[in-house]
Amino acid sequence: MFKRVTAWFGFVLLCSIPAMSQANPNQVAILKWYPANTSAEFSVGRAPWGIAFDGSSLWVTNFADATVTKLRASDGAQLGTFKTGTGPTAMAFDGANVWVANSGSNSTSKIRARDGALLGTFSVGNTPDGIAFDGANVWVANGFGNTVTKLRATDGKLLGTFPTGEEPACVAFDGSNVWVNNFVSGSVTKLRGSDGKKLGEFPVGAGAEAVAFDGANVWVTNSDGDTVTKLRASDGLALGTFPVGMTPSGIVFDGQSMWVTNYGSSTIMKLRITDGKVLGTFPTGSEPLVPAFDGANIWVPNSEDNSVSKM
């Protein structure tokens, strides 16, 4: 787990418009092609940790409250707060439901996105942290179990539990395979999505914290090294390690750039995916964790402020 979220808790002055070739098409479409700006901050529960987008709303886990909060993406209005298991951390959306990893109760909750109804709670491994959906199944990284659990999304049936490196923290799916970063091992494990067979384990940096896929490559934040590592998804070849801010905690792809939250400096950085160049650094709330992208904006849970920033 994030050692990361200390013991478990813990203007941009627009001088010019960047070249259109560097702009995100979704942002251009809504006349928001400028690099980034904290346009709003919204209150949620205590110690917000994970966040997921369901197509119209953002869901935020409130670690200290054992709840999740639903926010309308257009204006951040609260649409409800719903109970989940103890110590909710990461979230994933399966097209109809939100799945929540409950680190304190060794379980995963399935919540209907339409109305927040709890559809089921399913046992997984020890201290689940990261979670991802592969189009049919949900994969959960068990932080203190050194495993990842595969559940069938339709009914939560256990399909397998597979070994990873030491202290797996987050999960990403690349269309065929599942990638799990191992915090203590400083590595990322590649598993075949169909049967969980281990296809490789690749070194990254110290404190491998979060993982994201950009369509061709896998990116891992190294929280103890203040860097991110880029790996080619096809074979795990390291394509570069790039400096970022203090204690990088989360990462997300917006269709063109990578965004990295820096827990230690309360900022988020935008990186060019071709070479890892920093395109901008922007303030967030205090102690930001793993961000999400809603097709137009970046959302950041601020674990110390009990808030979410919309960029």
Image: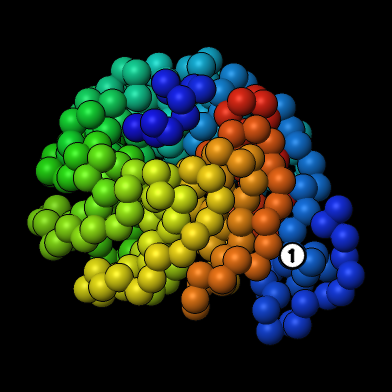
Q: Residue at x 88, y 60 (%)?
A: 13
* As drawn, 200 above or below 90: below
Tag 1's secondary structure?
loop
Q: Position of residue 293 (x, y in %)?
A: 59, 54
Comparing 207 with 61, the one in front is 207
Q: Amino acid at mark 1?
A: Pro
Q: Badge 1: how crowded within 10 Å, few (<14), some, or many (20+)?
A: some
The answer to whether residue 127 of the structure is visible from this angle is: yes
Residue at 40 percent of width and 49 percent of height: 225
Residue 281 located left or right of residue 264: right
Q: Position of residue 295 (x, y in %)?
A: 63, 60
Q: Which residue is mark 1?
A: 35
Residue 250 visible in rendering: no
Asked if residue 283 is positioned above or below residue 129 in the image, the reply reads: below
Count of picture labels: 1
Picture layout, residue 4 above or below residue 28: above
Q: x and y percent of residue 28 in the render?
A: 76, 72
Which one is nearer the viewer's eye here, 210 or 173?
210
Residue 199 falls left or right of residue 268: left
Residue at 43% x, 33% y is: 4
In this view, the residue in front, 101 or 207, is 207
Query: Does residue 32 appear to the left or right of 65 in the view shown?
Result: right
